[in-house]
Amino acid sequence: MEGHTIITSLHPDGEPKSPKGVKTTVVNQCGCYVRDHIPISFKLWKKSKATDIDADVVPETEKEMLWADVKRHFTFPEDKEQLFKDWVMKKMAIAFQTFKKNLNKDYVKKGLTPDFEKNFKNQRPYWEAFVQYKSSEDSEKKTAQAKENASKKKHFHHLGQGGYASAIPKWQKMEDDLVARGIVPATFNWPLRAKHYFYAHGGSLNMEDGSFVTSDAIREAADRLDVALKAVSEGSFKSDREKDELTYALGTPEHTGRVRGMGVVPWKHGFSGDIETYRSRQRRKAEVAEKVRALEERVASIEGALTASQQQPPEARSTAQLETSPVGLQRRFNGTPSRRSRGNGCGTLPRGRHRREDPL
């Protein structure tokens, strides 16, 4: 059938796998559908914390029409329809936001208007509303917030349009070439996602000796990864799903919806080795047990300190109790001597003042 593409297999996250190049075809087609059929007057692809106003969000009816277009142009494994649909919708959401971002950068910010006779003909009725919103205070505020958030990012990948899918085979070949020459790559025993993350962010291998070569931008994180890997080998650190060596090295938590070192994939695929913990309370029970253990250790430590204090001579015990009591600590904090340090209370009083008996 002319203009029809057959997808023979999918990755676990729904991404088209074969034939070669079919993913790019689907992504490009999704972009065309969005640009031709979704009004740019919509602010969001789906509801979020930013807005709960239905008029601002692309309706589900519009998305279903786009999905119908996809099904007319692509054939895919029937038993994987929902999986493929979810992946397609994510790509359409990205395409929609990218399209509006480029329109704002290339036209609105420059005070220009597209030639609707040549491009984006279906968007002409929505142009004024789009320009009005992009020039509004609300839009400027969100843009400023987005820039601030982006400025906090430390590490930037260098994958290009192909993403991890096109980069991973190149990294694998780099390692295979070293092994074929009898050289063990420094990353040979690294966890896969940690290896991919550092390669994606500028890391590489020295093809002479297999040592890991890193940039200044990720040097600190690479050093922390070495610490984590050593701790794992010694048994003092245990990886637990997203709380693994890479998360420790980067010092920031993993966010849902993507897996660093793998791309925009769900956790259930990115951390497939821990899949059994997603549908049970095992993980929660383990976390509670760890907190209880830590609390018990703390209580035991306090009880030990109290026991040691009680075994001291009475004079030393009373002094320790006074110094560690709330009143004693407050006096020490303020720099005020305790009652014992004042001796017998002798001292010179200002003229006209009389010593008062201490009722204590």
Image: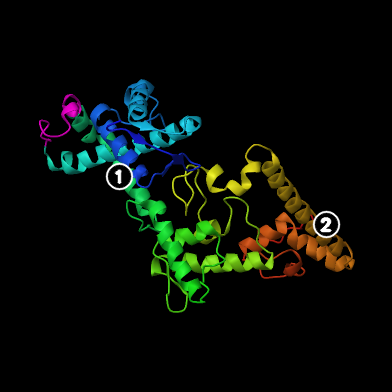
| Quarter of the C terminus within the rendering | bottom right
Residue at 27%, 32% in the rendered image: 2
Q: Is residue 217 left or right of residue 223?
A: left
Residue 24, can we see it? yes
Q: Return the residue at label 2.
A: 303
The residues tagged by marks 1 and 2 sit, at their Cα atoms, a distance apart of: 53 Å
| Residue 35 counted in the magenta span | no
Q: Return the residue at label 1.
A: 144
Up/down of 162 relative to 4, above or below: below
The amino acid marked with disc number 2 is Glu
Disc 1 or 2, which lies upstream in sequence?
Answer: 1
Give the camera-side residue of 166 and 200.
166
Give the camera-side residue of 66 and 138.
66
Q: Under tag 1, what secondary structure?
A: helix
Q: Is residue 131 left or right of residue 30?
A: left
Q: How is the image coloured?
A: rainbow
| Residue 125 counted in the magenta span | yes
Residue at 34%, 23% in the rendered image: 65
Up/down of 292 relative to 131, above or below: below
Residue 269 pos. (x, y %): 54, 44
The magenta stretch spans which residues? Answer: 113-126
Instruction: Specify the farthest residue to the front.
Output: 1
| Quarter of the N terminus within the rendering | top left
